[in-house]
Image: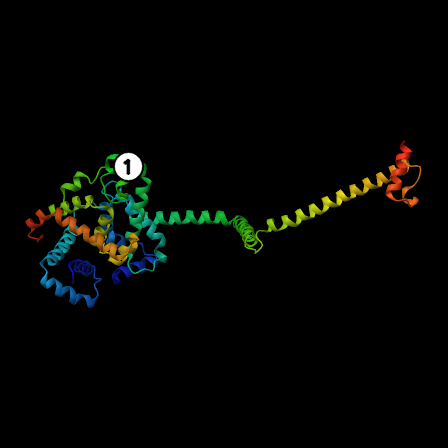
Amino acid sequence: MKCEHSTQYILLESSGELKPADRARLDAHLAGCPSCRSYRAALLHLGDEARADAALPPPTRFTVTSLVVEARRREEEETIRRHAWFGLGHRPVLALAAAAVAAFAIGFGIVVAASRPGGPAVARTAVPAHAWAMDEWVDVRMDLLSDDLATVAEDMKRALPFDPQESGESLDEIATRMLQVEA
Amino acid sequence: MDAQERAWLDEYRKGSREALGKLVEHYRRPLYSFILKMTEGRTDADEVFQEVWIRAIRKLDAFREENLLGWLFRIAHNLIIDLARRCKPFVQPSSAGTQTQSSWINRVPAAGIGPASETAGRDLGRRIREELVKLPPEQREVFLLRTEGEVPFKEIAVIQGVSINTALARMHYAVLKLREALKDEYRACGGQSS
């Protein structure tokens, strides 16, 4: 056994915590180690002297009655505080509980949405909305174009002395006739 | 806790204040001595002592542990730490850099153990007290818990929130330092010092 282990055993011995199995090992070491014997003696001596130091003034400003009275007074104060809190029909407690549940639900929803395979819910709805907007935009443009074509057809009807759709002529013939009209 | 202490505790739980008085008196010396030496006389040890008991009385009905004195020391330990924290603004700059290890207890302001208590008592006891003040607080506390309260290392470890090996090491260093500082007195007393 090394001295550093021996000193641990000596300390444990002084506090009554040394295992019986280690007692023999310690005794064997002490028998051949004057340094550890000296350490052990110093430990016992220091403890005795420190305990025997009678120069300490005793506590003076209390009595057992005052201790008990003060302890009870504080206990009553605490009880009153607790009643004041719960005396509101548990409303503060319920409000806190409701707030906690709401916070948990929101947090849980965010976590679930963020953990979906397609990513967060916000990102997933943005794409269809955009596509829908594109479709709508194309439809509107097509409507406008149709209107334009109808207007052109009306204008042509008004400007020409004949109906190009009913004449059965080719576009070249119509164009020739239009040029003749203009001339 | 021995049979007598347990009996006093049981009597108090049945309503006997006299039994509580016996418990307070029985533990007065080790507890008060621990508080006084830990605070180095810098704070009102009477107040801390009183506060320890007031807190203990409020929980005594529910106390189920084996070592009542160890529990009282634990309350005292926590109170002294709280006190040191509250007194933090009063730290004196001159004392801040003198400790190599953490020195929470040194934040407690005041003037040290008074002259009256210094002149009283036996020489070696007084010298031990003087040298104790120079120890790092953790080592001092282990030493006092062992010598004043005879608290086992297993419980000291719980009180300090460290492993039992750390508690043993702190005690070991405290003993080495005290032994070295007091070697002359030892020789005068006939003790060995090598």
Spot occupied by residue A95 in the image (x, y as percentages of width and height): 54, 49
Identify the image quadrant of residue A59.
Answer: top left
Q: Of B43 and B14, which appears nearest the observer?
A: B43
Residue at the top extreme of this rendering: A183
Spot occupied by residue B71 in the image (x, y as percentages of width and height): 30, 55
Judging by the rendered image, the residue that carries numbered circle 1 is B91
- On screen, residue A109 versus residue B109, left or right, reads right
- On screen, residue A159 versus residue B100, left or right, reads right
How many numbered marks have been drawn onto this rendered protein structure?
Answer: 1
Q: Secondary structure at mark 1?
A: loop
Q: Chain of mark 1?
A: B
Identify the image quadrant of residue A55.
Answer: top left
- On screen, residue A97 versus residue B19, left or right, reads right
For the point 26% across and 63% down, which residue is it?
A: B3
Spot occupied by residue A108 in the image (x, y as percentages of width and height): 54, 53
For the point 22% across and 48% down, which residue is it?
A: B140
- Residue B185, compared with residue A41, is above or below; it is above
Colouring of the image = rainbow
Spot occupied by residue B16 in the image (x, y as percentages of width and height): 32, 56
Q: Residues within 10 Å of mark 1 (few under 14, many from 20)?
A: some
Q: Of A46 and A155, which appears nearest the observer?
A: A155
For the point 34% across and 58% down, which residue is it?
A: B63
Picture quarter with the N terminus of chain B? bottom left
Q: Is residue A65 visible?
A: no
Dot 1 amino acid type: Val
- On screen, residue A10 versus residue B74, left or right, reads left
- Residue A147, compared with residue B145, is above or below; it is above
Q: Is residue B95 visible?
A: yes
Q: Of B81 and A145, which appears nearest the observer?
A: A145
